[in-house]
Amino acid sequence: MLAFPPVDPPPTAAQVSAVVLDDRTIDVWSFALIDETSVLQRCQAWLSESELGRAQRFVHAAERIDFILAHGGLRWVLAHYLALAPGAIEIHVGSHGKPMLLH
C-alpha cells in the first residue's frame, strides 16, 4: 500500500519523530512544488548557505523557486528519517555534483 502523507513541515527538531526503517520496505515520497509564500519561506530557511547560493544562480525566478522547494522538501523527508530539524541536516555536494549526508 502506498501512502503519501501531507507535507506539513515540522518547524523544530522537537516535533520531528524518526520514521522506522524496515529492510523489506521501499518508501516512496511525493510532494508538489507549490509556490506558497509560507512554504517557500520555511524551505528557504532550512537551506544551507551553499544551497542558497546555488538557488540565486538561477536566472528565472520560477526555476529558483522550484530549486528551493525541491531542496526544502528533500530536507523535510530526510528530517523524518534522521529525527533532526530540516535545517540541521548537513548535505555535501561531491566533486561530481552528487549529494551526500555528512555525519
Image: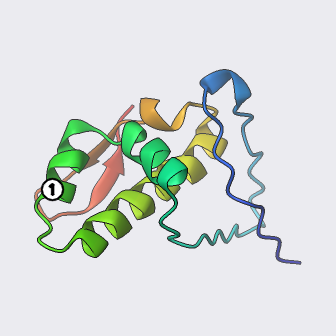
Furthest residue to the top? 14
Where's the C terminus, which quadrant? top left
Badge 1 marks a residue whose secondary structure is helix
As drawn, the residue found furthest toward the right would be: 1
| Quadrant assignment, res 97 | bottom left
Which image quadrant: the N terminus?
bottom right
Q: Residue 27, percent across and down?
A: 70, 67
Residue 48 percent location from the top left of the image: 28, 38
Farthest bottom residue in view? 1
Crowdedness near tag 1: few (<14), some (14–19) or many (≥20) residues, C-alpha within 10 Å: some
Identify the image's colour scheme: rainbow, by chain, secondary structure or one colour. rainbow
Height in image: 76 above or below 55?
A: above
Q: Is residue 8 above or below residue 102?
A: below
Residue 83 at x, y = what percent?
64, 33
Q: Which residue is mark 1?
A: 56
With 21 as the anchor, is 100 left or right in this view?
left
Camera-side residue: 42 or 72? 42
Give the percent coordinates (x, y) of residue 64.
26, 65
Q: Residue at x 57, y 31 (%)?
A: 84
Position above or below: 5 against 103: below
Q: Nearer the viewer, residue 5 or 98?
A: 5
- Looking at the picture, which amino acid does disc 1 mark? Gln
- Residue reaching furthest front? 37
Tell me the quarter of the picture where residue 50 sits.
Answer: top left
Task: Residue at 15%, 56% (x, y): give it.
Answer: 56
Residue 101 as seen in the image, left or right of residue 13 = left
